[in-house]
Image (cartoon, rainbow, N blue to C red):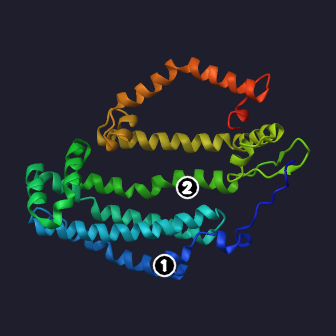
Amino acid sequence: MVTVTKVLERADVPAEQRWNDKSVFASRDAWRAEYDALDGELPKLGEFVGTLSDSPTTLADYWELQGKLRRRLRKLSSYVGMSTAVDSSDVEAKAMQGQLMGLFGKYSRNTSFDTPELIAIGEETLLDWVKNNERLNTYERVVTEMFRQAEHTRSTEVEQVMGMLGEPFGAVRNIYGEMSNTDLQFEDAVSDDGDPFPVNQSSIRIVKGSTDRNLRRSGWHSYNNGYLQFKNTFASTYLASVKQNTMQMRVRGYDSVLQMMLHPYNLPVDVFHNLINTYKKNLPTWHRYWDVKRQILGLDEIHDYDIWHL
């Protein structure tokens, strides 16, 4: 027996079950005030252009300022991210998110010079500064990682352009998010007893894990059919994302997009391929597992909508 569930509007959710937004900012006006203040302070980072090689003290001043401003930027981002996550139809929060993307772009433009300048100083000199300056002691890994990836760092001008691309390139992800989380509407799933059950991004896990197979089946098909209605739009956003990644890969001199994605984490491409190949070699084990699960569930055939049920 499945209880008919109603999807609550955000305003109907009990206050004690909501995230404590006021612990981050007292109000959205407070968020805007911090946004304006940070917007005015980000250009201070650009004032360090051409000075990082002057002395360890100058570099420490820059990194400390950068860290403080970056943490404030992340706080703004966390607030907006949570606001849109709990209510994808919150128009005001989406507008704030759009503003914030511009602020991230401004941050990138004002910090694009630092890595090329630091690489020009040299790893040996920077590590010596880190070792002998108390304010820089915690930056050893920052320096070593920077030089590990140095061959993929471009000139200040190119890095500035790459930073500016963050906002327009992020539009593809935003389009996908709006389509997937807000605009898509799904038919209700139906239980064995004929009761409707709403299908959305929040309830699909409940549907897939239900003991009611008809609910799982109808919910699974409803969810997938929702996406298939806009398959051409989703395919277009995916293609745009592929082209963006390919462009960045070429600009930075990687051999592949896969290498570009793994290199910041110091993961060789071979690790990825070894994982896939190991999985393929053990497919018979997976086949046995699914057959055992089919028998336990008492099914003649096991389908996608059955594999999530415990």
Q: Which residue is mark 1?
A: 32
Q: Secondary structure at mark 2?
A: helix
Q: Farthest residue to the front: give it.
A: 296
As rendered, which of 105 and 307 lies closer to the eye?
A: 307
Vertically, is 143 above or below 54? above
- Residue 267's tag is none
Vertically, is 65 above or below 256? below
**Which percent across, then down, holds residue 39?**
38, 75
Q: Which residue is mark 2?
A: 174
As rendered, which of 88 and 239 lies closer to the eye?
A: 88
Q: Secondary structure at mark 1?
A: helix
Q: Residue at x 79, y 26 (%)?
A: 298
Cβ atoms under marks 1 and 2 closer than 8 Å: no
Q: Residue at x 35, y 66 (%)?
A: 70
Task: Judge whether residue 302 can be spotted in this image.
Answer: no
Could you tell me the amino acid type at mark 2?
Answer: Asn
Residue 266, image quadrant: top left
In this rendering, position of residue 301 left or right of residue 109: right
